[in-house]
Image (spheres, rainbow, N blue to C red):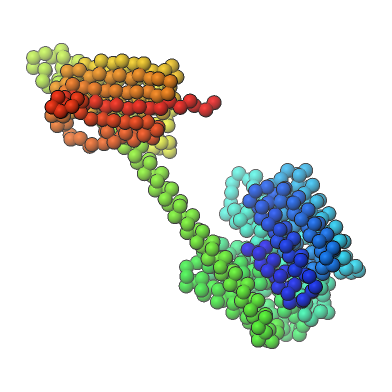
Amino acid sequence: MLLGAALLVDALLAVTYSVRYAGLALPGAALLAGWAYYGAIRRPAVGALAGAATLVASSVLIRLTDTSPVWVGINSILLSELLAGAVLTVLVVWHAKASVATGCVTALVIACLLSMGIRHAQSGSDSVLSLLFGFVVLAGCVGAGNYLRRASRQRVDTETSALIRRQWPLGVGLGVLLFIDIGTAGGGIPFVDLDPGGNPFKLLTLAGAATAGVCAFFAPRAPLRYVLIASTAIAAAPLITSTLSSGMLILSFSGIAASMALIAFAVRLLDRQQAVAATLAIVAGNGLALWTSSPGLLTDANAVMTLSFLFVIAVATGLYFRGRDRERTQSMRSAVTTAQQGERMALARELHDVVAHHVTGIVVQAQAALLVSGTDPHVAVGALERIERSGAAALTAMRTLVGSLRDGTMPGESATEQATTDVAADIRALVDDFPGPPVDLRLDLPDTLPHEAGRSVLRVVQESLTNVGKHAGDAGLVQVVVSSTEHEVHIRITDDGARRPVKPVGGSGGYGLIGMRERVELLGGRFEAGPSGSPPYVRGWTVGAWLPLRKESS
């Protein structure tokens, strides 16, 4: 926003003072501001070098067309060019290596000196003071870059350091503008002072602008409070100094820039009523300052329209960032909701596939033990042993889920997961512990199987056997076939029971098939489940899954 406002000020000054072809300097300044923006979001060193080349090329164009640029601060250097160079200096010192930063800063300084010479900079005291002013700006930017570099390396990020990293472009810009105002008020750097003469009392007028700049820098913490402080300071400083001197600084770049920043922060961060009140307070403070300095300015249509336009830009900027913040908040909420839903689904699948499998086995074996306990106690004892193993396995699975929640990992990501890297051994153990009808197992798996694919194979077989135990109590045989080709793994589980005549103990959640389908489709596979055979010869149930084999990246 500050660079855009500086470009606008350069354009208004060129038009106001009707300097011949002054507008020819603006395209180069706009391109330099673009390189500063590129350096902020991408590569600072490239932006700095390209900006230095752009400044020299623009100067050559100015010289060839005999243009007289309207400058503020440093002889023949536009305000927007000065601010863009300051931003690029901070960026390269902050982010680039020391050797690269030194080269880039040197290139920017040489480009500035060459441009002053090419553009026919004035000689004498003004040139000396311009060079001194430029040195102060350079030292300040290098110091700011070094501070940000050190702050970025700190392990503990404090609230103040985070604020400085966000607000440093505004701080650098306001600092440069304040230096310009100080030089102008002292009569040493020409252009803006409508009452030249170097009256030192006019420097006191800038106390309000300096206070407003500090308030703008810290405004994100408490926008309304700092707006009220800044408005009071802007209005009070000229009022107090009017008793000491009749000649005062009428136009303060730093004060106007700080006011624009405060309006933008108020519109962005406050609610509608507070934002309107804050904006009116800033406008009233600046209006009172202008009336105190020069009452005639309030009736000057050009001055009023210029300031109004700048403040409208500040309001529009605040509204833009307010809308962007709202969109970002909505996107974050949507992402959080999606992540939470994914975690809930993963937990539901784990509870259903793992814990429910073991609990179902316990129920089936307990029912079998009750049936034979009176006639064959030895079979009942064997069933009790299997119940004990299933209970221990269910307890282990529950502990794994609880551990994954405490560690912040998704189910299936824990290193203590029950599924091992030997999927075939896991499936055989699952079949051996199955309390239902006999299982005809046929395995043909590749030597290496991706973890997620192997885990899904195991879960599909596990859930299918669980469903057989729940719904096909009269089944005489279960066939489990797991085969593989070069590109996919095929799973097929078939039972010969009646068409689901058994109502499972505890009811059925109805999520088994849904969970299996989700697992398979998440890996890009295909899932089918339904009765075996065709009417009227429907008997049993068949589950089929096809999982693609993707080679893991090395």
Q: Is residue 41 above or below residue 262?
A: above
Q: Is residue 377 above or below residue 158?
A: above
Q: Is residue 414 left or right of residue 156?
A: left
Give x and y (percent) for residue 233.
Answer: 64, 75
Residue 244: where, in percent of width, then height?
75, 83
Regarding residue 296, the answer to whether it shows in the image is: yes
Identify which residue, 536 or 266, lies in the foreground. Answer: 536
- The C terminus lies in quadrant: top right
Instruction: Write the residue at 12% across / 22% down.
Output: 370
Instruction: Give the residue at the far left of this rendering.
Output: 374
User: Against 66, is 437 above or below?
Assistant: above
Give the residue furthest to the right. Answer: 124
Quarter occupied by the N terminus: bottom right
Q: Who is closer to the viewer here, 2 or 288?
A: 2
Q: Position of residue 318 (x, y in %)?
A: 55, 65
In the rendering, at what x and y percent does residue 122 appear? 88, 68
Q: Residue at x 68, y 51 (%)?
A: 39
The residue depicted at 72 percent of the width and 48 percent of the height is 46
| Figure quadrant of residue 441 | top left
| Visible residue check, residue 355 | no
Residue at 82% across, 68% down: 67
Question: Which residue is at the front of the view, 432 or 492?
Answer: 492
Q: Looking at the rendering, which quadrant does residue 187 occupy?
A: bottom right
